[in-house]
Amino acid sequence: MSLTRRHFFAAAAAGGAALATRPLVAAESGHAGSAITPDAALATLKKGNQAFTMGRAFNYGLNDGQRRAFLAGQRPFATIVCCSDSRAAPEQIFETGVGQLFVVRNAGSTVANPQAMGSIEYSIAHLGVPLIVVLGHSSCGAVKAAIEVVDKDAKLPGSLGAMVEPIVPAVHTAHGIVGDLVENSIRENVHHVVHDLRAPHQRLLAAPRRAGKLKIVGAEYHIGSGIVEFFDVE
């Protein structure tokens, strides 16, 4: 991406002003689910990222009373499946406050273990989250490691080999695509995870999707520009 933060100052000034008054999503005891629709949740993330690219971070100023309100429960409006990379923290790049995002993080943004998948299912079945975003990012070390495994038969120490194994199919697919192998592998990895989450066998996700209460989309965070590019949008 060639865009920089400066490109957004003039175009997004109005959006940033609106975001400055956006309230935290309140928790409600005994009630699972956000009142926000899937499309509205996606629009909120886009506006938050626009504010982030402007470099005008909003201070939510969480006070003791607001913090105590979350003792009754949580009502996040989006679940973000993302990488553990310290440069790609979703709460910051989407300009969100405490209690707004349900974040599932592991190297490579994969969902190939019960802990990750169960966390996602919990957010949908028990919290009623209307949107799942599978978020890859540029310069992903886990994807680069998977490429080393495929292209050079690299043997990774400890649990690293098992960690990148779910990414290997995306690398094989990316080899058939013209362009930069790392970038194509990152996007294909997101495609693969989105496809898996949308599969009919994911029963806890399939039912709300059929009812129009859940959307699952893919995205890539471009570290250099701060921009989140959404794709695979339903």
Image: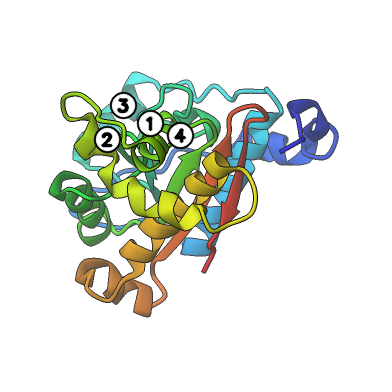
In space, the residues marked 4 and 2 are separated at their CA atoms by 20 Å
Mark 3 is surrounded, within 10 Å at the Cα level, by few (under 14), some (14 to 19) or many (20 or more) other residues, namely few
Q: Residue furthest front?
A: 152
Mark 3 touches mark 2? (CB < 8 Å): yes
Crowd tier of the residue under label 4, counting other residues whose Cα lies within 10 Å: few below 14, some 14–19, many 20 or above: many
Q: Which residue is mark 4?
A: 90
Q: Measure how far apart labels 3 and 4 are at the Cα level.
A: 20 Å
Residue most toward the bottom?
Answer: 210
Q: Look at 26% across and 44% down and name the residue there.
A: 165
Residue under label 3, please give it.
67
How many discs mark residues in the rendered view? Answer: 4
Secondary structure at badge 2 equals: helix
Q: Say whether marks 2 and 1 touch (CB < 8 Å).
A: yes
Q: Residue 35 in the image: state x and y as whole percent.
A: 40, 59
Tell me the element at label 1. loop
At mark 3, the secondary structure is: helix
Whole-number angstrom distance, CA of label 1 to CA of label 3? 8 Å
The type of residue carrying mark 1 is Val
Give the quarter of the figure containing the N terminus: top right
* Residue occupied by mark 1: 98
Q: Which marked residue is nearer to the observer: mark 1 or mark 3?
A: 1
- Mark 1 is surrounded, within 10 Å at the Cα level, by few (under 14), some (14 to 19) or many (20 or more) other residues, namely some
| Badge 4 amino acid | Pro
